[in-house]
Image: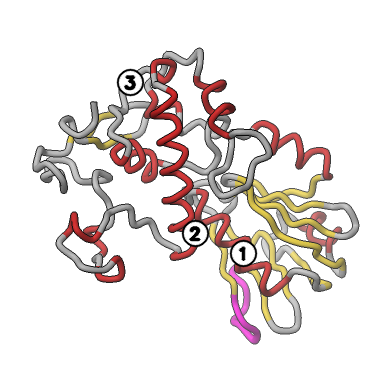
């Protein structure tokens, strides 16, 4: 499932092609035919993301809500382009570009109130600005949780946009054992977690990929020199030496999904 940096990047790139345009809209697959017809010929005010959710805000007041889930994919294409695939849920286009969406978990037309309800359920998003201290909100949502922190931060009501890769990498970077009960995590570690989430997801949004390692830890001089197999500290590296201490990386099931960590650097 795409993590939050991918969704925010999609919103930013799609805005460059569709924001402020009167768009054409259809559903070749047919499952979104009524929704597509509803926004056909309507000006798109803007596209914005929150966590793993995308919102297409039209001047009519309608909002198309997208959640890609495990299998959803976008294609942003210049026109002319090949015929859309039969499984295209939503096709949106102008005279110069089109957006091809297939396989999303959610593709629906909602109103502003429903959009706000979805946003209110989410935890703080590291890629958004917050009026109140996001660490306070994070601490409040973890205060009574006995579940391991490695499981808790995958809950989108705790932090919006964190997925399995960032989960393992962020906990490594702040030196926190993923099996620490969430309610026992000190405020200092929560502040570090938030700061690292902001730093890493901002990098990921700009580059379009997850690269959490520092060049010095993988024998490189510049970040641009880091190769594909060197981009993470723990994720999918079970049994391989920690890039900092040499201890073998461990893997375990924590919430129905695997988590990876260094038993020496994460206490």
10 Å neighbourhood of mark 1: few (<14), some, or many (≥20)? some
Provide the major secondary structure of the magenta segment.
loop
Q: Mark 3 to mark 2: distance in Å?
A: 29 Å
Kind of element beneath mark 3:
loop
From the viewer's perspective, is 253 left or right of 30?
Answer: left
In the rendering, which numbered label is found on residue 205?
2
Quadrant for residue 197, please give it: top left
**144 and 58: which is toward the camera:** 144
**150 and 221: which is toward the camera:** 221
From the viewer's perspective, is 198 left or right of 63?
Answer: left
The mark nearer the N terminus, 3 or 1, is 1
Q: Residue at label 3?
A: 180
Q: Residue at label 1?
A: 12
Q: Are marks 2 and 1 in contact (CB under 8 Å)?
A: yes
From the viewer's perspective, is 98 left or right of 238?
Answer: right
Q: Position of residue 55 (x, y in %)?
A: 71, 52
Q: Mark 2 to mark 1: distance in Å?
A: 9 Å
The mark nearer the N terminus, 2 or 1, is 1
């Amino acid at each position: 499932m795409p993590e939050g940096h991918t969704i925010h990047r999609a919103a930013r790139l799609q805005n460059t092609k569709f924001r402020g345009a009167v768009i054409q809209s259809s559903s070749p697959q047919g499952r979104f035919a009524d929704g597509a017809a509803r926004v056909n010929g309507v000006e798109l005010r803007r596209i914005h993301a929150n966590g793993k959710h995308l919102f297409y805000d039209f001047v009519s007041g309608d909002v198309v809500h997208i959640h890609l889930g495990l299998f959803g994919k976008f294609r942003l294409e210049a026109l002319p382009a090949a015929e859309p695939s039969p499984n295209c849920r939503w096709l949106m286009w102008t005279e110069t570009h089109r957006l091809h969406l297939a396989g999303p978990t959610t593709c629906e037309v909602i109103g502003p109130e429903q959009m706000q309800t979805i946003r209110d359920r989410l935890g703080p998003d590291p890629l958004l600005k917050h009026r109140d201290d996001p660490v306070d909100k994070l601490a409040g949502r973890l205060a009574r949780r006995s579940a391991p922190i490695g499981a808790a931060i995958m809950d989108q009501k705790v932090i919006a946009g964190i997925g399995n890769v960032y989960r393992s990498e962020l906990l490594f970077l702040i030196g926190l054992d993923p099996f620490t009960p969430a309610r026992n995590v000190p405020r200092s570690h929560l502040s570090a977690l938030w700061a690292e989430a902001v730093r890493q997801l901002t990098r990921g949004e700009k580059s379009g990929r997850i690269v959490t390692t520092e060049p010095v830890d993988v024998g490189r001089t510049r970040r641009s020199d880091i190769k594909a197999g060197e981009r993470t500290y723990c994720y999918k590296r079970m049994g391989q030496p920690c890039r900092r201490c040499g201890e073998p990386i461990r893997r375990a099931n924590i919430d129905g999904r695997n988590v990876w960590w260094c038993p020496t650097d994460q206490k």
